[in-house]
Image: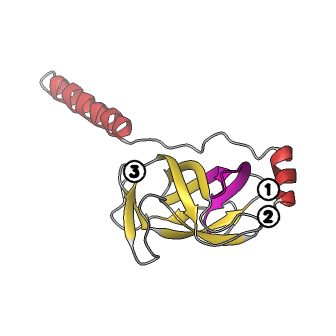
């Protein structure tokens, strides 16, 4: 190899490696929160009339209501949603708290706490979406930092988080 090409080859290799490393660092990696649905929670949910597979609808962000044709921008992290429908002994208006994250285009929420309108609070295992393991696909134009979703979405009762 001619000695004049070595610096160019080194520079090109360095630039390509830097671009790959920088590109990888720039992508925000998301992981499912390490949550379990404890046996005691499953037992309590049965007492509340909550059975795996039951479904309902909720306002994804309790403080920003809207219908299924209204869209909002959401961020990964803690979320408090408001039930729109009664499921078991959880009446409409119940607040459910969980963690929202995005994984390969699908938005997930695992809800672990329900606060009823009368002030009572219970552990629960609910997921965003119409079936287990949960999740709904984000709208076009979504990024990890700005997730576009309908304001009203389905949820499902589960006995374990997958």
Per the model, the C-alpha gap separating discs 2 and 3 is 30 Å
Query: Is 8 inside the magenta-drawn segment?
Result: no
Q: Residue at x 19, y 27 (%)?
A: 11
- Labels 1 and 2 touching (C-beta < 8 A): yes
Q: Residue at x 38, y 69 (%)?
A: 71
Residue 99 pos. (x, y %)? 56, 47
Q: Is residue 57 above or below residue 127?
A: below
Query: Is 120 inside the magenta-drawn segment?
Result: yes
Per the model, the C-alpha gap separating discs 1 and 3 is 28 Å
Q: Secondary structure at mark 1?
A: loop
Q: Is residue 96 above or below residue 65?
A: above
Q: Is residue 7 above or below residue 82?
A: above
Residue 144 pos. (x, y %)? 39, 50
Per the model, the C-alpha gap separating discs 1 and 2 is 6 Å
Find the magenta span and give its range.
110-130
Q: Secondary structure at mark 3?
A: loop
Which is nearer the N-term, disc 2 or disc 3?
2
Left or right: 105, with 128 as reference point: left
Which residue is situated farthest in the left direction here?
4
Which is nearer the N-term, disc 1 or disc 3?
3
Q: Secondary structure at mark 2?
A: loop
Q: Quadrant of the N terminus?
A: top left
Say which residue label 1 marks. 159
In depth, the one of 57 and 144 nearer the eye is: 57
Left or right: 14, with 65 as reference point: left
Q: Residue at x 77, y 67 (%)?
A: 88
Which residue is situated farthest in the bottom direction here?
69
In which image quadrant can residue 25 be found? top left
Say which residue label 3 marks. 144
Q: Residue at x 55, y 43 (%)?
A: 31
């Amino acid at each position: 190899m001619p000695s004049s090409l070595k610096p160019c080859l080194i520079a090109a290799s360095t630039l390509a490696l830097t671009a790959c490393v920088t590109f990888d660092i720039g992508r925000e990696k998301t992981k499912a929160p390490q949550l379990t649905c404890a046996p005691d929670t499953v037992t309590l949910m049965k007492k509340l009339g909550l059975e795996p597979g039951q479904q309902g609808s909720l306002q994804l962000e309790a403080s920003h209501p809207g219908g299924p044709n209204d869209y909002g921008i959401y961020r990964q992290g803690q979320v408090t949603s408001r039930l729109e429908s009664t499921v078991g002994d959880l009446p409409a208006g119940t607040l459910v708290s969980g963690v929202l994250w995005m994984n390969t285009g699908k938005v997930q929420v695992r809800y672990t706490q329900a606060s009823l309108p009368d002030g009572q609070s219970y552990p629960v295992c609910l997921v965003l979406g119409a079936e287990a393991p949960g999740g709904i696909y984000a709208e076009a134009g979504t990024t990890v930092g700005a997730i576009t979703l309908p304001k009203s979405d389905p949820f499902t009762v589960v006995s374990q988080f997958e």
